[in-house]
Image (cartoon, rainbow, N blue to C red):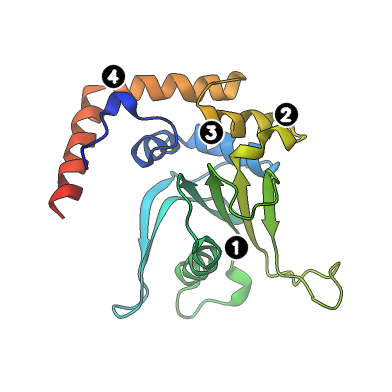
Amino acid sequence: MPLKPIEELTFTDDFMFGRIMQNPEICKGLLERLLEIKIEKVEYPTLQKSISPHYKSKGVRLDVYVQDINRVFDIEIQNFLDENLPKRTRYYQSMMDIDLLLKGKNYTQLKESFVIFICKYDHFKLNLPIYTFQNRCDENSSLILGDKSIKKVFNATAYKNEKDVAISAFLQYICNQKPVDDFTQKLSSIVEKIKKHEVNRKEYQSMNLHDRDN
C-alpha cells in the first residue's frame, strides 16, 4: 500500500492528530469542549503511551494520554469500523488504572478516568452524536456505581443531532474536514502549518519507512 503523502493528511490521521494534541492548550481546549468541564492545567500530553504491566500480558498503546490534578484522559481517533471497540475501552480503562495504582498505593489514589473515542462512523447504529457509558445498577438505572470511570464514544456522522454548538462544530469538522468555528479554524490552520514544516515532513517519512520495514 503506497504511503499517503503528507500533503493529503487531515486532522484525523494518526500522525497529524498526535502532533496537534502535543500542544497542551489545544488538548485542554478539546477536552473541555468534548466533556463540558473546566481543566485548570494539563500535564504535557503523552503520545502513543505504551502500558504493559507484565511481559506475558497484552500491552496497549494509547493515542493521547493526558493527566490533570484529579483526572486522566485517553483520547483515541478512530477512522474505520472496529468491532472490538467496546472491549478495547474496557481494556484501556483497566490498563490506565494499573498504570496509576502502583504497588503499595491505596484505591483512593485512583483518579477519575475518561476513555474517549472520536469516531468517523456510528459504531452503535443509533444515530446519536455522543454515547456515554458508566457502570450502573441493572435493578435501578439511576444508581451509578461511582467508580469514576467514564467512557465516551463520539459519532461524527451525527453532528447535526448534537445540541451543543461547540461539540457539533467539532464533530462536523471531523466528518468533512471543513472548519466551521474559531476552534476548528485553528485546528485547520495548524494542520497546514505542520504539513509545511520540514522537520515534520522528515519525521512523517521516517515513521512510515519504519512501519513499512516492520
Reading the image, the residue beneath label 1 is: 111
Quarter where residue 44 is shown: top left
- Image coordinates of residue 175 in percent, x first then y, are 55, 33
Check the image and name the residue furthest to the left: 213
Amino acid type at image mark 2: Val
Amino acid type at image mark 3: Ile
Q: Earlier in the sequence, mark 4 or mark 1?
A: 1
Reading the image, the residue beneath label 4 is: 196
Q: CA distance from mark 2 to mark 1?
A: 29 Å
Mark 1 crowd level (few <14, some 14–19, many ≥20, 10 Å Cα): many
Q: CA distance from mark 2 to mark 4?
A: 31 Å
Reading the image, the residue beneath label 3 is: 174
Q: CA distance from mark 4 to mark 3?
A: 21 Å
Which one is closest to the eye, mark 2 or mark 3? 3
Q: Relative to the observer, which residue lies in front, 107 or 169?
A: 169
Above or below 144: residue 209: above
